[in-house]
Amino acid sequence: MSKRAAEGSSDTPSAKKPTMSKSGAPDGGPGQVEIDENLHSRQLAVYGREAMKRMATSSVLISGLNGLGVEVAKNVILAGVRSVTIHDTASVTLQDLSAQFYLTEQDVGRNRAEACREKLQELNTGVAVHAASGQLADDFVKQFQVVVSTTAPLAESKRLDGLCHSAGTAFIWAQTRGVFARVFTDFGPAFTVYDVNGEEPHSGIVASVSSGCPAMVTCVEDERLEFQDGELVQFSEVVGMEKLNSHGPFKVKNCKAHSFELDADTSGWGEYVRGGIVVQVKEPKTLAFRKLEQALSDPGEFLLTDFSKLDRPAQLHTAFAALDAFEAAAGRPPRPAQPEDAAELLRLAEGVAAGAAEGAAHKVEAVDGGVVRQLAHCAGAEINPMAAMFGGVVGQEVVKAVSGKFHPVFQWLYFDSLESLPDPEQLAKEGGGGAEEFQPLGSRYDPHIAVFGRTMQRRLAGLNLFLVGAGALGCEFLKNFACMGVGCALPGGGAAGRVTVTDDDVIEKSNLSRQFLFRDWDIGSSKSTVAAAAAQRLNPAFSVTPLQNRVSPETENVFNDVFWQGLDLVVNALDNVNARLYVDSRCVYFCKPLLESGTLGPKCNTQMVIPRLTENYGASRDPPEKQAPMCTVHSFPHNIDHCLTWARSEFEGLLEKAPREAAAYLAAPADYARSLRANPDASARQQLEAVAEVLLEGRAGSFEQCISWARTRFQDYFHNRIAQLTYTFPEDATTSTGAPFWSAPKRFPRPLNFDPADKSHASFVQAAAILRAEVYGIPRPDWAADPARVAAVAAGVDVPAFVPRAGVQIETDPKADRSKPSQAERTHDDEAVIESLLGRLEGAVGQLGAGLQISPIQFEKDDDTNFHMDLIAGLANMRARNYSIPEVDKLKAKLIAGRIIPAIATATAVATGMVCLELYKAVLPGKPLEAFRNTFANLALPLFAMAEPIPPKVIKYNGLEWSLWDRWTLEGDLTVQQVLDWFGAKGLTAYSISCGPALLYNNIFPKHAERLGKKMSELVVSVAKMELPTARDHFDVVVACEDEEGEDLDVPLVSIKFR
């Protein structure tokens, strides 16, 4: 039986406290598990509350605190298990610092686990971190739910795995050897995966169901169905064929974009009438893992990472088996650049291959000598990027083992990044490659030198690198750079380069679960400043400069031409597309390599943008995010997302936009009125009505009046508007074609009546009243903390009875423009209404008092004490109740309404590790396109898809070739005519020249002929209004051209170097 904590506290095994000699904080008892939702909100969006609870009752043993071990420990501690015990028998050496970021030179000689325990404990005070040394006794090992081994030799790993397999403990054996890695997992003979991919169950809205076998189900065409043949589905809310709701789940087949068939006979179930929701039923999956002893000779199917290396996993399985034999015999790994050791390893590998059973899937026809020799070269060294990448991979496997969330590696994962190694030709061009190339310098970088050579290390040390962003990705990158020696002076070497990191954000509590360089006491401080200081503590030789500027057109005075020209490399660590596109455009302009990456929950991607070799980041775009039609959100919601979108909009309208307009009016009444009278349209009327509501009709002077306002809003939102909607469109209403108006996906709503005993009603009026009081600066009485007392006051508010109005227009067109007032909101007397409201406001200004302060409230999702999410969740859930849509808790509401991007530390570590492996390829010139890799990875499945980058589009004309990486520079303070002549000499007809949005010249305008003799530098100042500071020697223009056939031809950006 698995020792993973099961669902429900009654089935949760208590995690026993280890008794082996160790140090550390005491374990917290399993008891009642509480998840800090402010800290773990982004992680909860990935794992869910139940999986997090299982994690929080689990104990993990990590044996081997080398670079890989500390990376795994970091990620597991950040994830929030109950306790982590780190174990090691080895002492710290200087070489450990190449990948073990929590060790210092002062730790040399200390036990590795003891030396880094306190720093690991700082990552998450909610996780008990212990350190242990000595041999791993059987009873000690059996106390844990997961055991990870990163340094044990094969014999010890077999012993540990056999022990764990019989005890129901998950076992993971992982190693990185230079640019090679292997991972083995054994989660026991019957391991249950509760959720194989972590995706939300697919769903559809039923439009019709046929009677018969098989039954054909058709769904509305709003969304494409994602069901796959063989999956199970469950129905609800079907009218007329109710057995669909009570029977099942049903297997589906012949799945198409908007229909599927049920493997069921519905002929005796009546006729389908209307309605229905169909949802995928996600089935658990049970996996039978083999012990390491068996899996070595019968490994099964390998997890493939690179489709250009289809036979590589089998080659590496053979090579690593030979490596185990070599180390068992020699008592050491092969030495770098030693032909004798490489030859011996190759001999052993050929013996392993010959001994493999005929027909076995892992048997190789011929051992790849090149791969084996490189493994021999790398085997004794550990490098940071591989430790970071596989620290993420293995950390995720630990989480899978204790939570049952996501599909584990089953059972072998092999990887290499041989392309990261410098080619002999590259080394020779840089003056390297001699006898001393791979010899140590007696420094912390010696393992990197053993793998990549001194030439590469000197190049890394001298790099000038720009890191854009200091959040989750940025923290990992800074740690990696400090360990790799980027911008770090070498002993006896030349001047160091520098890493410049910029981020305009400050640290929040929710950052701490994955942005590992930050601590509680850093909250509110600059991300870049704190991260840079923390990275320097990891390596005091690290040259890093933190800035707090956003990289954008507005900061080109900071990040000017001189800055960009001085860079060797740019690494993006951003979380939004627009910023990425801008940095991409700058890298293209200045011809600088850009290493791009991003994460989304357990998924991550990397993209290499290499000058003249690859396309740029902006060459491909994701499709725009689909938005629900305005009429759906406002009147016809059919899922909780619609309700939350509406709730967020109402929150901002009531508490931010309207108060802001009211404050603007109070600050300058005459100017405000003058502005509205200049453009008295429907938008201006709505704006002024909001001001009047805040300052006149709805103005509050006491907390009781705020409660009255909240009660009135409840009545308006959840009773009156719904009653008016159903009066205008009764349940039996039909469309102009005679079809039922309330057909799928529309849901017929029911008005709510306020009930002070209903906790949701009480919570809504409490949150609304408290926030309304905040707008007016009204003190909150102590009793306001009791929603029942607030609701009792609200129940006494006199609310007028609803009277339906005839002729009310309600928008039903899904294509209506959400940015403009609807037809129902437009009137023919907007100007008259505006004048009337201005008159009332002007008459009341004197009575409002000079001391009246209106404070708009800006939505903040990550403060659970501010009542913002309480109000939004209340708005959304009451609206959901109107439409019989399932309600959600505050956490789910926060994730959707707060537009929280799911994020976990493991995916971040994998992404940054892969990027840093690509960095090695980019720093020495000469790597071909096929050496680089763009990667998409999904740790949930798990899936790794690596592919060569796409080359840039090359245009050829008249013997010329250019791509997006080219920029044509014209020397001299040229006139327009001289520019046209320059193009004419190349067989191109330039007919238009523009600078930014300004048109400097176009031959279709006769008046522009007057500009032909004018200098371009004069026109960019007089027409384009561009400033040309004395420090700048050029400006850029876009020239539109035709070829000799009169066809438009895209040409590069043109720089006029006028000084």
Image (cartoon, rainbow, N blue to C red):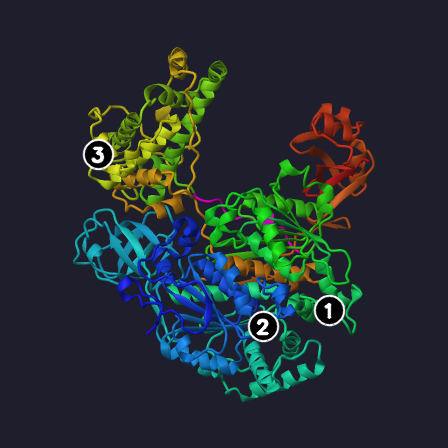
The part of the chain drawn in magenta is 614-626
User: 338 or 681, which lies in front?
Assistant: 338
Q: Nearer the viewer, mark 3 or mark 1?
A: 1
Residue 442, horizontal then vertical, whole percent: 71, 69
Residue 754, label in figure: 3
**Callout 1, which amino acid?**
Leu
Q: Is residue 505 left or right of residue 567?
A: left
Secondary structure beneath label 3 = loop
Residue 728, label in figure: none
Which badge, 3 or 2, comes first in the chain's sequence? Answer: 2
Q: How far apart are labels 2 and 1 at the CA level?
A: 21 Å
Secondary structure beneath label 2 = loop
For label 1, the crowd category at 10 Å Cα-Cα, with few meaning under 14, some 14 to 19 and many 20 or more, is some
Residue 91, label in figure: 2
The total of numbered circles placed on residues is: 3
Please, is residue 560 above or below residue 949 in the view?
A: above
For label 2, the crowd category at 10 Å Cα-Cα, with few meaning under 14, some 14 to 19 and many 20 or more, is some
Q: Mark 3 near mark 2, Cβ–Cβ under 8 Å?
A: no
Residue drawn 45% across the image and 19% down it? 665
For mark 1, what is the residue?
Answer: 441
**Callout 3, which amino acid?**
Phe
User: 544 or 754, which lies in front?
Assistant: 544
- For residue 617: magenta? yes
Which badge, 2 or 1, comes first in the chain's sequence? Answer: 2
Residue drawn 44% across the image and 79% down it? 137
